[in-house]
Amino acid sequence: MNAPLHHTPRLGLRSFRAKFVLVVGGAVLFDLLVSGGLALWNVQRLSRDATAEVGQGLERANQDYIRSYAETTAARVNLLLAQVHSDVGTLAGVLQAQIDHPAREAQIGEAMVRGAPEAVNVVYDEKGRWAQNRPGPLSVVSVWGYLLDSNHKPLPKVEAEIENSAVLDLVAPSLLANGQSKLQMYYIGPRERPIFRTAPYTDQAQTFDRLYPGHNEADFWTFFFPGLYESWQQWAQDPGLRPVNNDITQTAPYTDAITGKLIVSFFRPLWTGDRKAVAGAAGADITLDQLAEIVENVKVADNGFGFLTMSDGNVVAINPVGEKVMGLRSSSAANSEGVTGLDRSLRRSAQPQIAQLPLDQDGSLQHIMLDENGEKVPYLVVLKQLQPTNLWGSGPVVRETMSLGIVVPEREIYASLFAAQAKITEATNRILVYQILALLVSLLFVISAVFAISKRITGGISALAGAAKRIQLKDYSVRVDIPSRDEVGEAGAAFNRMAEQISFHTENLEQLVEDRTREIEEANLQISALNTQLRSENLRLGAELAVARHIQMMVLPKAGELQEITDVEIAAYMRPADEVGGDYYDVLKDGERLKIGIGDVTGHGLESGVLMLMVQSVARALQEAGNMDASQFLNSVNRAIYKNIVRTNTNKHLSLAFLDYEKGRLTLSGQHEEVIVVRKFGLVERIDTLDLGLPIGLEADISAFVATREIAFGHGDMIILHTDGVTEAENRDGELFGIERLCESARQRYGRSAEDVKLGIIEDLMAHIGTHKIHDDITLVVMRHR
């Protein structure tokens, strides 16, 4: 026996070691460069995509917020105007009832004369040549000179008008003290006898003399409100001539003769008993401050503001900062007759794009550029039209639709967008630097490792090569000594055994070849049979899983079923983690009664999916059997599922909760994840179900643990049901999506349809998960009270 063969490899250009270093090192280096380059390219691409998605989402959210803010503010202005309309209508109703019942009108007038003579006794003023009651009563009544006889006493019909109008003292104080704040309320007689009674008491005629010389000799209606009375006369002949289907008529803002404040007057004409002519008017004044307060308090971002404009572009309410930004110029338009109004038109703005704003487009969002200190600054403008009204300016009554505008700098409303894009860019650059450093470190490590192990690996191979040459020369006594314990060492040991076997089997080689050939053929047959069986099993298992998944999806509520529900809008989403999931949700409808269930079987896969189907079948059967009590229903489901779990000897159970809805009443039962309720103004309520039940399938009887809870569910309220696959979804850093993110995502979408809310939450969830693997079934149900 010869001594073991040792061999020291050389690093020549033609040596195996050199080739090993070049091939292995080159392959690894190429792989590192390609994978590193792809990683860097993917990071940049993901950064671009994320920036675009975040940008679009935030831009839509911000624009929706501005539109919602404009609609809310417009609703407040409409509410203020509607309250004033209501009060004027109440006063007009009382006065109209007097006109429609002349006998009662006379009786009340006589009673007022006896009970409150100071309200009807007027005194002639030599200087002004008019008559007026003395201070003290609840109202002041002014009688103009052309309504007096030669003794300076009111004409008989005028005297009756004074007495009958005293009913204002009974109604106006209550209306002034309640409801929307009003400056004054008044009654004006018909054109033939236009006495002017106003509450509270003021020096009415004296103020008119000072501000409107000559009014006492002119027709009252023509002097102060030219064209208004004529428009009402036309309405009496044909109500269809009203620009807006309402008798209430308002004025444009003007300077009040008594208080000197900018006010808006609201009139409602009174009709004769036969409704063929005008019998006077009831009215009320509010200060422009009341409208302006709502608009001037608009605060969007840091420097956003609001404005209220007439359809002709005259801005009636805006704060000083907004007036400067929009380049408005204020002026007063005074006439010898009529009223003095405010003239501050958008059309004369120093900003060209403000002057061209389209006021007839309701809800439009405009991107405009405004000059600020010689620099063009981008702004967003949202215009929301108010309820149309009948407007008198100076002439016939016309239709008027005021618009509320919200103006905000884009740099402020999109501040979160710019910050998010900057953060994404910063994170991308940081990742790129780390990737490049990791690539360089990997290259150094690979080069060092290849050189370190090449000697050890190729040394054994060189020894084997030398020994093989000696075997070729029929020297079967050769042996190799390879001390390593890796595959090369094993090859050396095998080589030594082979050399011994070659020496032993040289004489009966042919018999050995036949035996080995037969063994190989038998092994091949067994392998072929096993492969065939394995393919068959795989096909069968795949088909079974596909059928199970198909059945599971078939029993879920269809879109058509959900759309048939009138009171409640429902949208749902379910995504199994495997081919078959363990989450459960269902919407069972029995007449006007709904039962909405949600549950989560422990684990997921085929067993969990089968248990989910059991729950669906049992719930459907109980509902069809008329089991209406929430507690009994849940206990019956538990008994049936518990028995099936015992029979199948499976280690499964599930959390399960039901919501019963009937005629506005919502009842919660069962233990599951928290129920999220989003109410008006985005208020979020979280309802814990821990004390309302016990996991299904743990005990045969859970009746002692089942409880119910009533949940308020009003118009516009929204309920979110979910499984833990939503809140426990992880991103690649291991951070959970969490209940807080889910609540915030739902709150931000309050007011939208259930389908939009569902899609928005799923979009936020998938953005959080990113490319990370989904480990659990995800189920989400959104309910919205229509």
Image (cartoon, rainbow, N blue to C red):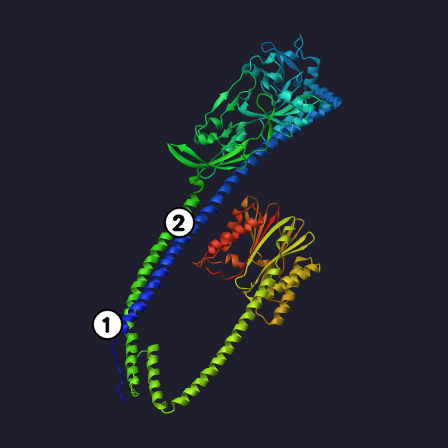
Rate crowding at label 1 as few (under 14), some (14 to 19) or many (20 or more) other CA atoms within 10 Å: few
Residue at image coords 45%, 82%: 520
Q: Is residue 268 visible?
A: yes
Q: Give me the C-alpha separation between circle 2 and circle 1.
A: 53 Å
Q: Secondary structure at mark 2?
A: helix
Q: Please tell me which of labels 2 and 1 falls first in the chain.
A: 1
- In this picture, residue 432 sits left or right of residue 126: left
Give the percent coordinates (x, y) of residue 157: 70, 15
- Lateral position of residue 772 relative to residue 537, left or right: left
SS of the residue at dot 1?
loop
Estimate the x, y position of residue 757 in percent, counting from the top left.
55, 49
Residue furthest right as drawn = 103
Q: Position of residue 231 (x, y in %)?
A: 64, 22
Measured as percent of width and height from the top left, residue 113 is found at 70, 19
Q: Label 2: which residue?
A: 423
Disc 2 and disc 1 in contact, CB within 8 angstroms: no
Does residue 554 sit above or below 129 in this rendering?
below
> 692 or 255: nearer the eye?
255
Q: Nearer the viewer, mark 2 or mark 1?
A: 1
513 left or right of 394?
left
**Residue 202 sits above or below residue 679 on the image:** above
Which amino acid type is marked by label 2?
A: Lys
Closest to the observer: 335 or 667?
Answer: 335
Residue 12's label in the rendered image is 1
